[in-house]
Image (cartoon, rainbow, N blue to C red):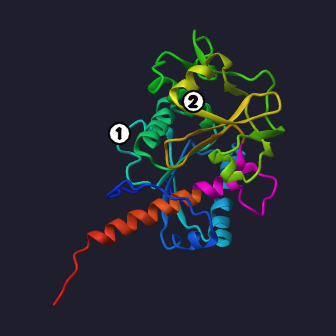
Amino acid sequence: MTSAAPTAAPTAAPTVVLAATPAATQAVVAASARVALVGDRSADVAAHGRIPTIIRQLRARDGLAFDAYWVPTTDTERPGTLDGFDAIWLVPGSPYASEAGAVEAVRFAREARVPFLATCGGFQHAVLEFARNVCGLGHVAHAEVTPDAADLVIVPLACSLRGHEGGVRIERGSLAEWVLGVERSTERYYCSYGVSDDYLDRLRAGGLRFTGIDDDGEVRVLELADHPFFLATLFQPELAADAARVHPVIRAFATAAVSRAAARLASRRAEIPTISG
């Protein structure tokens, strides 16, 4: 991994096709995806420490190659910072150094249709971006950043989930179900904030799908149906108990990233003129 971002932008924005079979996966492994790890890298965030191992496992076990670049949230405030990446992963670590930068990363991924994964604090900021930019709720805020704001779309959880495990029920027919392969899973958390119930109906009306809930009915997974791959979890798949195997959420995201990279590579090859004679 490196902190330097690539400068060349893809020549096209192809639709990502998830590799659902080993054969399909093998068709895209030749391409190396460029993935932005948006967040403020810290030795104090356990999930950050797990990411290098996850990347090695994806390469060794799944044949999925991607080059990961740490991009601080203060950098993503600037237009163009995320151009050229095949996927964006908004990693845990809230409060971020720049709320605006985290929100901008979500907006870019959503509008550019770049494969997107957000975990823990990333989930919270995915909700914040959608509420502001899609639902027209420009005034809403995150309680961890501006606790005295009048309208909070992200609020303290009734019971903190820092260091806890809990069950998540997955909606049938959702991307989350396709990724996880089950209708219920047990996941690890390290957060204290979630979505305010007061805004759920407005967010759903805008097109945000909440496809995973806990045993108390609180939302834990969200996705967008009209996006190639847009998935966010309040839990941290980086902290999966099985250290020998990458969590399926991350593996599916990596597959989407490599698929986009393969399509980008194919597009560039198609542009090379054929010399006859």
Q: Quadrant of residue 199?
A: top right
Q: Quadrant of residue 92?
A: top right
Label 1: which secondary element: loop
Q: Is residue 107 visible?
A: yes
Whether the magenta-drawn stretch holds residue 248 is answered as: yes
Taking depth in this image into account, of 92 and 119 the one nearest to the observer is 119
Taking depth in this image into account, of 100 and 20 the one nearest to the observer is 20
Circle 2 is placed at which residue position? 127
Crowding at mark 1 (Cα within 10 Å: few <14, some 14-19, many 20+):
few
Counting residues from the start of the chain, the first of labels 2 and 1 encountered is 1
Circle 1 is placed at which residue position? 79
20, above or below 212, in the image:
below
Which amino acid is tagged 1? Pro
Q: Which mark is residue 61?
A: none
Taking depth in this image into account, of 210 and 79 the one nearest to the observer is 210
Taking depth in this image into account, of 183 and 155 the one nearest to the observer is 183
Q: Nearer the viewer, mark 2 or mark 1?
A: 2
What residue appears at the point 26 percent right and 73 percent down from the top-left corner? 272
Q: Which residues are magenta?
A: 236-253
Whether the magenta-drawn stretch holds residue 120 is answered as: no
Picture coordinates of residue 26, whole percent (x, y): 57, 74
Picture coordinates of residue 248, whole percent (x, y): 69, 55
What residue appears at the point 63 percent right and 15 percent down from the top-left corner? 147
Is there CB contact under 8 Å for labels 2 and 1? no
Which amino acid is tagged 2? Val
- Quick check: 23 left or right of 78? right
Q: Is residue 142 visible?
A: no
Label 2: which secondary element: helix
Picture coordinates of residue 136, whole percent (x, y): 45, 20
Q: Residue furthest front?
A: 173
